[in-house]
């Protein structure tokens, strides 16, 4: 078995709109092609022995009802009855991730077009782990089919490591999950651990539990333990006595002043790193100094305060939670060794690797061994019955400690104290460590003290304590970042279709910008922020959409969305406000396993399915496949049509729907029984006096989207009248150059549907001779190339045939033969001049065209062609 194609979806896609994080793979089953699980002897038994829990029901009630009927867990009965091996593979890939602490459950498989090849699709939590799980699932299934042994431990360990490397951590995750529950979008920023919540100008950012609101000064104060202690002491907060040392001599002086027990910790430390508590003798003190100086040359030495370790969490000036922390420990039974006791504690199902579960497994590291050595113990020592041994000097959850929620036990004095401390230090999210014998007694009466103040405190002890009530401490963080009435999103209008989507995108972006919005938009030409092109090339995929949504200056996004991005990695957003589908036609068929127009419609149909419930899907009622998308969406639908008598429009409007139609030469909005005429289409420069029917259609879609977005009639009319097509505004889309002798049109028409509509424009365009400079595309099906060239042959009186620089899989001779054949299907005597290079072909056309001719350049290199014509225009003007 081998993987022949592997893609990672990061947003809504052709394979699922709901499940956005997907591994999509084509798997060649090779020698196992056509085999099912029941045709391989003992396969079911071997797999169930390796994965005894694979048949367990999904959490959250997913084991019952429709979901279970569609995709039930894999069990021995199913394997023995017979399941396709692709189905088995995705179940194994999911179970491998679950065994490594990544709870993923959804998947599917189905045959690919090639014989013996299966599509395997399943969810992942961490992308790298999902890919590795797929590779291992293939190895496991193939090995079991051959009856050979499988050792799962190394791969589970590897997946655990990947999870720990990639997972954003429980604290960050809790905030992200809370935001997502409120429909606040998030983006993980690359090359950092920063998460963006919200879009554009409304975004906020978090890094662990620091936020966009976190004061840099507050973080600096908290990071300097001496400064923190001095500020708290001046404000009347109980703190332990202490000093800062840099050497053993200074340490000895500090001990002479403070006496034992003491604590050593780095001046600029956090999360308990380098700290040693309850030091009772000089040797331990010297070791504590060394441990602290790993993190900071300056080391705080202070008196050890007797009592329990408490962590108080303050968010936005309010105490949110309190936890009593206990270091990792074991209790002897008089028979088992310390290592055996540790192993027994780690069998607790709540303990896992790193942040995988509520508690972290205890590791006997060097720090633990040092503690044991100081007590003349080893891991093989047997503890007396009921004797408790602390294995760490700090109570951090990440080193195996436990926490019990004590929020409801807090004395009001201590609540006020915590809130004052957070304000004194200046932190929006503040973790306060204090030692006290009883949190229900005022700190000043229990002889306790504030030990430390932390920026970016961990949340795990509060959201999943070992004892007591879990606290949703992420909710007040999101409340602080997005208080009531503050939006997190920006409006998003997304556009897809086979033809017209770039022009429609630019029309809508122009309309939105004309009302003063700071627009970010993406097209096949590039990414534009407030009218400035920041990226060039085809920018219609998910990464380009994220580029716009991450920009902190943008307050309105208009996103062209092509099929390539949806098939490659999914959409760059989960929801939009308005989705426009211009049309669906035969183009790019046979690529990425999309072989029919109906399958292409399913790809394009992903976009309207992402519209929020009270948003709008703007659909072309003249296109059967686009109109059918209305049945798949969960939002409101608006239609547009070039035919005012289209029965679909009439029925829709009579039912109270909204539509845009081309009637009596006008772009008109229909709502109920009312007509709102925007303007005569011939007045819009983009329609070339009404000759360019395809741009009337694009104007309909743009006007309707603008109307639904809340723009009034005059706004829409003005925008459409002021949108002038040019090489700068609409590169490669109906760019017209009028020279003294002839006219040149530059366009990007590259499929049969597009050139058919262009042909209608040319039929209405007078010319002494119509000359086309055209080429074929090597990655298109032969029938598509023949269809395109046949229409071109009908349109033009003369053709200059050229080649693209990228032949896309065919030879130049193959493309030439197909194009010549198609061009002459209806005009056997059509004059064809073959000039391979595009610029040479254009030069020939410009030099030989007669007066009054119209030359059409269907171009590949838009920028170079426009630059050439601009230069030619300048030279003609100076003659």
Image (tube, rainbow, N blue to C red):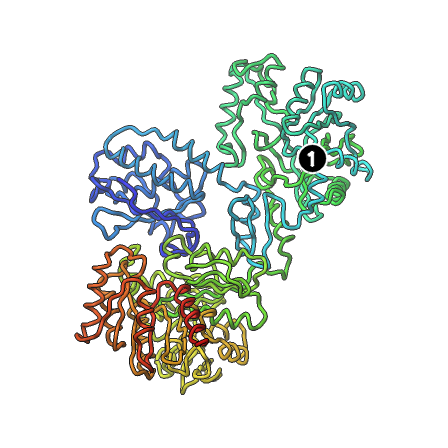
Quadrant in the picture for residue 12: bottom left
Q: Callout 1: helix, strand or loop?
A: strand
Visible residue check, residue 315: yes
Residue pushed farthest top? 376
Residue 261 position, x and y percent, is 73, 21
Quadrant of the drawing holding the N terminus: top left
Which residue appears farthest toward the bottom when viewing the image? 664
Q: Nearer the viewer, residue 672 or 374?
A: 374
- The C terminus: image quadrant: bottom left
In the rendering, at what x and y percent does residue 741 appear?
36, 80
In the rendered image, is residue 636 in sight? no
Q: Who's the residue at 62% across and 45% down the image?
A: 473
Q: Position of residue 541 (x, y in %)?
A: 42, 57
> Which residue: 33% across, 51% down?
69
**In the rendered view, does 413 fall on the left or right side of 721?**
right
**Residue 219 appears in which quarter of the rendering?**
top right
User: In the displayed structure, would residue 233 be above or below residue 27?
Assistant: above
Indicate whether 67 appears above or below 416. Answer: below
Near-viewer residue (168 or 332): 168
Q: Give left or right: position of 775 versus 673.
A: left
Task: Judge the density around disc 1: few (<14), some (14-19), many (≥20) Cα neighbours within 10 Å.
Answer: many
From what the image shows, is residue 470 above or below residue 558? above
Q: Position of residue 86 (x, y in %)?
A: 28, 44
Hey, which quadrant is residue 170 in on the image? top right
Which residue is label 1 attached to? 433
Name the side, left or right, on which 118 lies relative to 423: left
Depth check: 274 or 322 in front?
A: 274
Q: Quick one: which residue is furthest to the left in this view?
A: 828
Can you say whether 717 is above or below 192 in the image? below
Q: Nearer the viewer, residue 286 or 799?
A: 799
Q: Residue at x 68, y 18 (%)?
A: 286
How many numbered markers are drawn?
A: 1
């Amino acid at each position: 078995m081998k993987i022949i194609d592997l893609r990672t979806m990061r947003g809504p896609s052709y394979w699922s709109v709901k499940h956005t994080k997907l591994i999509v793979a084509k798997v060649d089953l090779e020698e196992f092609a056509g085999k099912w699980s029941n045709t391989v002897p003992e396969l079911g038994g071997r797999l169930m022995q390796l994965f005894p829990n694979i048949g367990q029901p999904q959490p959250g009630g997913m084991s019952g009802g429709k979901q279970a009927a569609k995709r039930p867990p894999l069990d021995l009965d199913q394997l023995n009855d017979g399941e396709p091996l692709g189905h088995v593979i995705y179940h194994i890939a999911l179970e491998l991730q679950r065994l490594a602490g990544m709870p993923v459950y959804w998947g599917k498989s189905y045959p690919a077009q090639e014989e013996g090849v299966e599509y395997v699709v399943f969810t992942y939590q961490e992308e790298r782990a999902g890919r590795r799980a797929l590779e291992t699932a293939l190895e496991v299934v193939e090995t079991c089919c051959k009856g050979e042994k499988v050792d799962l431990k190394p791969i589970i360990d590897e997946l655990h490591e990947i999870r720990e490397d990639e997972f954003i951590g429980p604290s960050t995750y809790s905030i992200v999950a809370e935001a997502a529950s409120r429909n606040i979008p998030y983006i993980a920023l690359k090359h950092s651990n920063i998460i963006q919540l919200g879009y554009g100008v409304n975004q906020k950012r978090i890094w662990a539990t620091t936020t966009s609101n976190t004061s840099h000064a507050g973080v600096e104060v908290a990071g300097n333990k001496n400064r923190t202690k001095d500020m708290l002491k001046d404000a009347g907060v109980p703190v332990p006595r202490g000093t800062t040392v840099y050497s053993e001599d200074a340490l000895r002086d500090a001990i002479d002043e403070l006496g034992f027990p003491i604590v050593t910790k780095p001046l600029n430390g956090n999360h308990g790193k380098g700290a040693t508590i309850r030091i009772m003798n000089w040797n331990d003190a010297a070791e504590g100094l060394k441990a602290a100086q790993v993190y900071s040359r300056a080391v705080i030495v202070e008196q050890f305060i007797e009592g329990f370790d408490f962590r108080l969490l303050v968010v936005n000036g309010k105490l949110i939670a309190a936890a009593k922390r206990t270091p990792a420990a074991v209790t002897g039974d008089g028979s088992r060794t310390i290592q055996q006791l540790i192993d027994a504690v780690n069998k607790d199902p709540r303990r896992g690797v790193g942040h995988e579960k509520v508690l972290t497994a205890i590791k006997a590291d060097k720090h633990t061994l040092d503690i044991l050595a100081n007590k003349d113990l080893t891991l093989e020592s047997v503890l007396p019955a009921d004797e408790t041994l602390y294995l760490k000097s700090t109570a951090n959850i990440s080193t195996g400690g436990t926490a019990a929620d004590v929020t409801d036990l807090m004395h009001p004095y201590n609540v006020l104290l915590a809130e004052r401390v957070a304000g004194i230090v200046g932190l929006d999210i503040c973790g306060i460590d204090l030692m006290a014998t009883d949190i229900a007694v005022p700190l000043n009466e229990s002889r306790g003290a504030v030990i430390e103040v932390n920026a970016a405190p961990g949340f795990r002890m509060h959201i999943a304590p070992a004892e007591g009530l879990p606290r949703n401490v992420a909710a007040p963080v999101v409340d602080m970042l997005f208080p009531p009435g503050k939006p997190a999103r920006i409006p998003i209008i997304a556009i897809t279709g086979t033809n017209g989507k770039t022009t429609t995108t630019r029309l809508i972006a122009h309309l939105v910008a004309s009302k003063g919005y700071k627009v970010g938009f993406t097209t096949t030409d590039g990414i534009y922020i407030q009218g400035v092109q920041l990226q060039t090339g085809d920018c219609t995929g998910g990464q380009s959409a994220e580029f716009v949504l991450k920009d902190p200056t943008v307050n309105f996004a208009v996103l062209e969305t092509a099929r390539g991005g949806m098939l490659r990695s999914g959409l760059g957003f989960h929801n939009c406000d308005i989705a426009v589908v211009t049309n669906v036609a035969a183009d790019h068929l046979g690529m990425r396993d999309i072989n029919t127009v109906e399958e292409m419609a399913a790809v394009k149909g992903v976009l309207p399915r992402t519209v929020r419930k009270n948003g709008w899907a703007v659909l072309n009622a003249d296109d059967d496949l686009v109109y059918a998308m209305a049945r798949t969406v969960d939002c409101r639908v608006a239609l547009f049509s070039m035919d005012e008598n289209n029965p679909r429009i009439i029925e829709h409007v009579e039912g109270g729907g909204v539509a845009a139609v081309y009637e009596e030469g006008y772009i008109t909005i229909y709502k109920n029984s009312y007509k709102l005429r925007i303007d005569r289409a011939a007045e819009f420069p983009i329609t070339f006096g009404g000759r360019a029917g395809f741009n009337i259609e694009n104007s309909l879609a743009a006007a309707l989207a603008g109307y639904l977005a809340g723009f009034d009639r005059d706004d829409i009319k003005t925008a459409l009248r002021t949108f002038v097509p040019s090489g700068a505004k609409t590169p490669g889309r109906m760019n017209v150059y009028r020279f003294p002798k002839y006219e040149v049109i530059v366009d990007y028409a590259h499929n049969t549907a597009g050139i058919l509509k262009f042909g209608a424009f040319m039929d209405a365009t007078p010319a002494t001779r119509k000359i086309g400079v055209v080429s074929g595309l090597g990655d298109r099906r032969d029938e598509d190339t023949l269809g395109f060239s046949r229409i071109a042959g009908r349109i033009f009186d003369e053709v200059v045939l050229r080649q693209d620089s990228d032949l896309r899989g065919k030879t130049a001779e193959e493309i030439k033969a197909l194009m010549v054949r198609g061009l002459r299907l209806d005009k056997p005597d059509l004059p064809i001049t073959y000039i391979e290079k595009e610029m040479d072909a254009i030069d020939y056309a410009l030099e030989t065209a007669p007066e009054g001719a119209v030359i059409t350049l269907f171009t590949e290199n838009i920028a170079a062609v426009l630059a050439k014509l601009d230069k030619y225009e300048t030279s003609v003007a100076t003659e």
